[in-house]
Amino acid sequence: MTLPVDDSPAARLRAATQARIALGRSGAALPTGPMLAFQLDHACARDAVHLAMDGDTLAQLIGGETLSVRSRADTRETYLKRPDLGRALDPGCAPMLDAAAGQGHDLALVVGDGLSAHAVHAHAPALIAVLRERLSGWRIAPVVLARQARVALGDAIGERLGAAIVLMLIGERPGLSSPDSLGAYLTWAPRIGRRDSERNCVSNIRPPHGLSYDQAADRIAWLLNAARSRRVSGIALKDETDMPLLADPNAP
Amino acid sequence: MGFAIDLAGTRHRFADLKALLAAASPHRSGDVLAGLAAADMRERVAARYLLADLPLRTFLDEALIPYEADEVTRLIVDSHDAAAFAPVAHLTVGGLRDLLLSETVDGAMLAALAPGLTPEMVAALSKLCRNQDLIAIAAKTRVVTRFRSTIGLAGTLAVRLQPNHPVDDPMGIAASTLDGLLLGSGDAVIGINPASDSVQRAGELLRLLDDLRERYAIPTQSCVLTHVTNSILAIEQGAPVDLVFQSIAGSEAANQGFGVTLALIGEAREAALSLGRGTIGDNVMYFETGQGAALSADAHHGVDQQTMEARAYAVARAFDPLLVNTVVGFIGPEYLYDGKEILRAGLEDHFCGKLLGLPMGVDVCYTNHCEADQDDMDTLLTLLGVAGVNFVIGVPGSDDIMLNYQSTSFHDALYLRRTLGLAPAPEFAAWQREMGLVEADGLPRRLSPDEAARLLPPPL
């Protein structure tokens, strides 16, 4: 059976945007239905921000050797108020990373909770599996699971692991309709103090609504190879592609 | 110059004027992040005691950011109107609070005083004000501006219709615009935050909005909120630019972070004025600000975020804007942690802007990592309505799907107008009646989709 296509002007407008239009009204206010729908979406986003990252399950799903570290932000409240602490490695975690440096690595892979552990749980293991297929020749350090992490925490981790590049997979700030969006931030020669303009970013990884794992892995692999051959990341790499690959100012 | 006071058995010391202002500020996470906040509550009150006795003249004699180092300071000092200041020149900050609250002071007096006040004076004053003082004093004054509609008249509340779309899809933007117009939003401006930074796209969006405006003969103005350099280029390329937008902050270095100087903003304003598109006025600038902007650019010079925000208003008032919008809750919890801090900041910004003579609107908003929700926004929105805010933001269902934050909705504006007996801008209200868009009670007509499409035919 084919459903009749509604091509009225109103239907065509409605189909053109995900914005919350044509909601009706109760007096001046939102009707109960759309009001509750909004509250549900906000609840999903809020819970994603406050959900704790489940390191054990993640380690199991990711497989191979993993390391667990945390930032200097000891609670979620501190994390939200003090981005500087979320960028700094807890000193107690340093020896473990130093010991794992060995002869150095081509790539350090870090999974950080960021602003949505939900995104990490939903997408990080599958994305890492696809990435590993595309990076068969690379010497990859043990995957690091980082709690209360901001993007720049990857700099300290990558530096201690002796990695040429750090790739931070991190939960992005939840939108009202996107509580599970994962971002991937790549930094050549990670060192404490790197600027955001020295990173590249692939954001909105969240199939089926955003980028698929294959699309994301393609872009990330392109960036990794370009960074390795040009020995640089950030603005210098952005120039060579139409993709919006610079770090977002709203980054976690 | 240092300050000290003995209170409740403790001596409190403050190294200089900046430290005193910062310590007197109500608690907010951004000042803690910057290491500027009062160490405890007694220290905060001690700072307020000292501030209350501080002569207003102090702020003319002592710059928080050196004159030589900062063009915003130079603007503040060089444009200060000593004659307008004269009636309060003998007062302390506390004395100014008592005066402005007194029944002898009315809107005309506040308007006359505005050029004599500096941002630092009103910031200091705000730190001595409770929320009700911020509302009561601001409610005495009106700042009225005009382009194609009149914004800020007593008894009115205007709305910026914000029809953003994640990929700037013209039909998606048109859909949100029509929804907003049907619900009575858009009299302040129809303003798009573009997802793209390209001048060509800005031109396309400007033509889309201008075509809609002309098609329905709406007495309002449009704006694409792109960088001033893009607006200048768009004007050169013949795009229909009504208002020039720019984000601004309270120091030269912070404005550099936005890629602007005072000279560049002036150049953009001249370009917009040269088009002569305003029909009833020539306020052609639209500025956005927000507490924390200077700190986030590491350009706050050790000054607290509320005082830095007030300094941004000195930049705005130099260019005779149609609209100034403080995007109060957008910046995130590291600057304003929760609903209480956002509420306070929204009232402060509106108060300081109005006292400095600006047409203040507020984007009553929050992000999902803030400790805030719709109830907090309802409270701030209502208080701003009572305080006489010029305009608020209207987003479909409060959900900005491009900027990923929650602002006020078309419905919220209807609620505020209805509850406080406020009307849209008069030209826009007349247009609504002519087009048959409102019921006798002023609420939007309940239209079927087909009826709506007949009244405002979409650009399909």
Image (spheres, coloured by chain):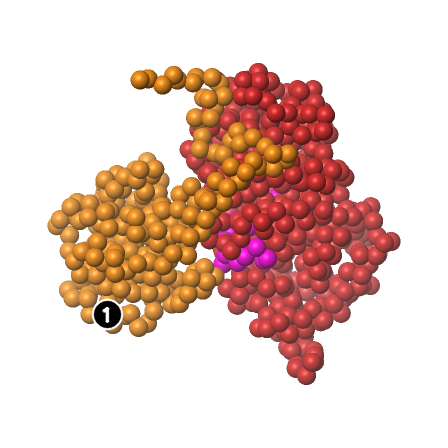
Residue B35, can we see it? yes
Residue corresponding to mark 1: A96
Residue type beneath disc 1: Met
Where B8 falls versus B319 (above or below)? below
Q: Which residue is nearer to you in this view: B116 or B457? A: B457
Residue furthest to the left in view is A137
Identify the hue of chain B: red
Give the residues in magenta. Answer: B323-341
Q: Position of residue A216 (x, y in %)?
A: 27, 42
The residue depicted at 49 percent of the width and 18 percent of the height is A9
Count numbered badges in the picture: 1
Task: Please give the chain letter of the residue carrying mark 1.
Answer: A
Q: Position of residue B434 (x, y in %)?
A: 69, 20
The residue depicted at 80 percent of the width and 57 percent of the height is B101
Q: Position of residue A144 (x, y in %)?
A: 25, 60
Identify the hue of chain A: orange
Q: Is residue B333 magenta?
A: yes
The residue depicted at 76 percent of the width and 52 percent of the height is B137
Location of residue A2 by image quarter: top left
